Image (spheres, rainbow, N blue to C red):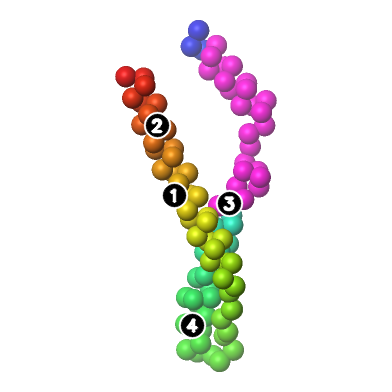
Amino acid sequence: MKDEKTYSQAGTLKDSGEEFTFQNAWRPVLMFAITAILFINYGLMPLLRIFTDRAETLNLPGDFFTVLMIGIGTAVAGRSGEKVAKTIKGLKND
């Protein structure tokens, strides 16, 4: 019976088409892009200014930081929610 359930679950996952697609990964990609922009703007460009006068930083809009804070907040809330759900599920099974 256990093997049938595992096979059934595997078939369901296969049929649902759960693959690594941009639709599933756009939030991490966005956060990595924002992190790269911040690193280049506030880390790399000031170092380059030591050697050349051509390195300029970007004037980032306030909404840029709002998107960053929302992304970080949802990641933290999502991860915390997963931990709470596992804890509650563990308590119900005991």
Q: CA distance from mark 4 to mark 1?
A: 30 Å
Amino acid carrying label 1: it is: Val
Secondary structure beneath dot 4 equals helix
Secondary structure beneath dot 1 equals helix
Amino acid carrying label 4: it is: Pro
**Mark 4 residue crowding within 10 angstroms, few (<14) / some (14–19) / many (20+):** some
State which quadrant residue 20 falls in.
top right
At a point 44% along the width and 38% down the height, the residue shown is 82
**Mark 3 residue crowding within 10 angstroms, few (<14) / some (14–19) / many (20+):** some
* Residue denoted by label 4: 46
- C-beta proximity under 8 Å, tags 3 and 1: no
* Residue denoted by label 1: 76
**Between 50 and 90, the one nearer to me in the picture:** 90
Q: CA distance from mark 2 to mark 3?
A: 23 Å
At a point 55% along the width and 11% down the height, the residue shown is 4
Q: CA distance from mark 3 to mark 1?
A: 13 Å
Dot 4 or dot 1, earlier in sequence: 4
Residue 52, magenta (yes or no): no
* Residue denoted by label 2: 86
The span picked out in magenta is 4-28
